[in-house]
Amino acid sequence: MFFFKWLRVIVAAIFFAAISALFLDFTQTVPRILHWVAHFQITPAILICDFETSKIFRTLFQTGTGILVFWVVLTFLFGRVYCSIMCPLGILQDIFLRLAKLLRGKRFKLKFKFRSEMKKTRYGLLTVFVLGLVFLPVTVSVLDPYSHFGRIMMWIFRPVYLAGNNILAWIAPDSLYYVSNYINIPAFLLALFVLLFIGILSSLFGRRYCNTICPVGTILGLVSRFSRYKIRLKPGCISCGLCEKSCKGECINSKNKTVDSSRCVACFNCLSTCKRHSLVYSPPLPVISVAPKEPEPLPQRHAAFVPVPVRAENHRRRFLQWSVFSFFLPSFAVAVRAASPSPDPSLPTGISRVSYKKTTPILPPGAVEQKQFRKKCTACHLCVSKCPAEILTPSTFELGLAGFLQPVVRFERGFCNYDCTICTEVCPSRALTMIENIDEKHLLQIGCVIFVKENCVVEMQGSSCGACAEHCPTGAVHMIPYGDPSKSLTIPEVEPDLCVGCGACEHVCPVRPFRAIYIDGLEKHANAKPAFDPNEKQQEVKPDDFGF
């Protein structure tokens, strides 16, 4: 019976390591094929569900319907294996539970007991989740286990990981390099609350979160009631209670010899605990009629049950405690970078004269429009972690309450790479439609350029700049003569129809606090005009054509 448990542990460890690597990777070295682990999560699959039969057979595992069918069939056959091997938040609870057992020691051994199903809480939260899919998407991101895990990895473990890298880079600068490290406060606070809540709840009550709060667990529980393979008790069970004490799902009633299969997460701990092998993981057992017989008298000088000897104390406990402490120690060295870095010292600087406010938030490429994006995005922040330019940031209230913590584009730390489509490739819920053709990205307009002449250093100081025009990839910003011809000054001129909203001009503008040129968002993404006729050969730009 140990085979089932260790097979589950090995498979879960592989999946957990793969999905953790997606969020922790900052060198873009993790193979893109690992993204399918995020795409196989159930909540994103629900959001991209497509019931067109032709698409189901065309690309079974590239549609939400195909993924849902896969998990429903697997659950119907083998129970809630998704919760035990694929759900990263469920595996994280197992890790907390294991750490709690090591830190408690043998004197405070954690023992579970059967608890009745909390139906009102369980199905009430499921109802809120279903209604949120239609009316209030923020409830989906608050209840979705995968999105919780993504935010925990992104805003708690990733800063610690990057801080450790920066410490090693300071020690060995020839081998590693320093990377920027920042924290989004609202996302960090929510992730920290969920992490503490999950850690405490799992350390005391096992998988209580999965069987009471998690809507995905409730959905799978409805299917697992009819699963073919279940944990079953043989007629020879003596109701010793060992399986009940080891069941982190709190679903085994050893007294009545029943198992609530809707709450069983298929961890198989009970199989390895039973000393009489009275539990099996199998299809329905055959009914065998046994004639009643008189109970055998117990020996006079012996107890009814021989107590199981306690294992010797694990001498590696102190080593594991110090390992955990040393893992979290670098978190005290996390450097939070300022939201608006200093301008390039090689460029002239200036203090803005005119203030303004952007009217529309800028959505990532592939978002298409705000309504669709708010409905499908679960705020898992995988796109935020994978963006090489670090321009995707969780929103507060730019997208309203329905879009809380969903990513928006800001250009304080960089600008959108003209040839980059990574965020559209990794999005598991298809809130960002995949851009397969790079030429499509070159014409995708996510924002529109606006020039504020009164803030430009050419206007304020009479000095040359032209950084915005030099960095514009489409020619939407170009320089024209300005002022006294003897001074040979040029000032930017914009053509909004050519702008794709990459933000390169806004990022390099040296004026603070309000830039002289900036990108405003669009309610719906559009197509920009091509910078040149694609039927004609593009003219080679000579270095002398630039202002400096």
Image: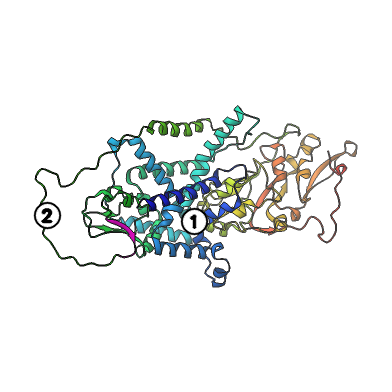
| Above or below, 364 relative to 186 | below
| Above or below, 68 relative to 458 | below
Please tell me which residue lies in front, 121 or 382: 382
Q: For the magenta stretch, what is the residue range?
A: 278-284
The image's colour scheme reads rainbow
281 in magenta: yes
Residue 58 in the image: x percent, y percent? Answer: 58, 69
Q: What label does residue 233 carry, if any?
A: none
**What amino acid is found at the position of numbered circle 1 in the picture?**
Gln
**What amino acid is found at the position of numbered circle 2 in the picture?**
Glu
Residue 36 in the image: x percent, y percent? Answer: 55, 55
Instruction: Specify few, some or many for label 2: CA neighbours under 10 Å numbering under 14, 14-19, or 20 or more.
Output: few
Can the viewer see residue 361 in this picture?
A: yes
Residue pictured at 76% horizontal, 49% vertical:
473
Query: Which of the 4 image quarters holds residue 198?
Result: top left
- Would you say 247 lies left or right of 186 here? left
Instruction: Specify few, some or many for label 1: CA neighbours under 10 Å numbering under 14, 14-19, or 20 or more.
Output: many
Q: Secondary structure at mark 1?
A: loop
Residue pictured at 10% horizontal, 43% vertical:
301
Q: Depth-wise, is mark 2 or mark 1 nearer the camera?
A: 2
Q: Secondary structure at mark 2?
A: loop
Residue pictured at 57% horizontal, 60% vertical:
372
Can the viewer see residue 213 in this picture?
A: no
- Would you say 98 lies left or right of 381 here? left
Residue 423 in the image: x percent, y percent? Answer: 61, 51
- Which residue in the protein does label 1 denote? 41
Mark pair 2, 1: CA separation: 53 Å
45 in magenta: no
- Which residue in the protein does label 2 denote? 296
